[in-house]
Amino acid sequence: MKIVDAKGKNCPIPVIMTKKEIDAGAKELIVEVDNPVAVQNVSRLAGAMSFDVAQEEIAGGFRLTLTSNGAASDAAAVTAAVQAAQQCAPGGSWAVFVGRDVIGDGDRELGSSLMKMFFYTLAESDDLPAQVLLMNAGVKLAVNNPDTIEHLQTLVDKGVELLVCGTCLNFYELSDQLKVGTVSNMYDILSRMQAASKVISL
Amino acid sequence: MSLAYSVILFDSTHDAIRAEKTLKAVLPVTLMPVPRQFSASCGISLRFATELRPQIEELLQRHRLAGRIEPLNAE
């Protein structure tokens, strides 16, 4: 049986790791976590995805054995469980809004280097945003910049939601060239900003 | 994956940006902020897999790029 070792992982990572395995088709899996909040969050997700949970204490934490009960998963409950897990990050969930393809005014080449380094550093960090939101020229970071595409992919793999403005992709005629992230719209992007406890704009 | 990495440090931001363009055309290098332990340099560094060090050194020399290489602990 697949064992997901989420000990030492900050909230909401244990939930994201568990969801990834279930989405990939696991019917039975073991998730190990090191704190009661993670037990609660993973159990809530498991319930929403129609898995039964058996819990036992192990050295340094808890072992949860998840077994599918065959029923369909409840999409709304799954979204709620993931969002609840994101809220438990220290300081609540936060988002990064990027409306340009460079950081700051001044030299574009320097601004482009700074943008690459920002996403490299963010992707390596332990405190991740719940979302990265790309608008206007910011969408190009997910289309034609190999460095930022790589860093954005790392963020997505770690459970960060990447929403890319579809209107903007269309405007720049890049709709069929998106390399990473989900095409989105003003409603979804605004709702993520409203739910976040802070939004950092670049 | 336990690949060891090294970084190239520069005294000037312009050198760092020029080196990125030149090296990237040939080898996989990643622009990153200078790691905290090497605070005394321009702020932009280039990370590469240590196994590429001979090629990197050769390119730096050939293009007269003023960079100094330091090992970066994997992990």
Image (spheres, helix red, strand yellow):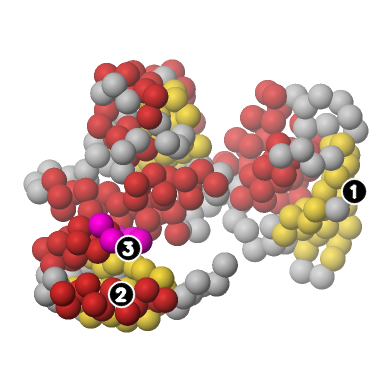
Are the residues at dot 3 and dot 2 in contact (C-beta closer than 8 Å)? yes
Specify whether A39 is left or right of A155: right
Q: Which amino acid type corresponds to the residue marked 2 in the rendered image? A: Gln
Q: Residue at x 72, y 44 (%)?
A: A21
Q: Which amino acid type corresponds to the residue marked 3 in the rendered image? A: Leu
Tag 1 and tag 2 share a subunit: no
Q: Is residue A84 visible?
A: yes
Numbered tag placed on residue A54 in the rendering: 1
Q: Is residue A198 visible?
A: no
Please give the range of residues in magenta: B25-33
Specify whether A57 is left or right of A137: right
Q: Residue at x 81, y 24 (%)?
A: A72
Query: Which residue is at the front of the view, A188 or A153?
Result: A153
Residue A71, image x, y percentages: 86, 26
Q: Residues within 10 Å of mark 3 (few under 14, many from 20)?
A: some
Residue A90, image x, y percentages: 53, 52
Question: Which chain is home to disc 1?
Answer: A
- Please determine whether, in this image, residue B39 is positioned above or below residue A18: below
- SS at circle 2: helix
Q: Residue at x 83, y 32 (%)?
A: A50
Cα distance in 3D space between marks 3 and 2? 9 Å
Numbered tag placed on residue B27 in the rendering: 3
Query: Which residue is at the front of the view, B60 or A36?
Result: B60
User: Which residue corresponds to mark 2?
Assistant: B55
Residue B29, image x, y percentages: 33, 63
Q: From the viewer's perspective, is the residue at label 1 or at label 2 nearer?
A: 2
Residue A195, image x, y percentages: 49, 31
Cα distance in 3D space between marks 1 and 2? 54 Å
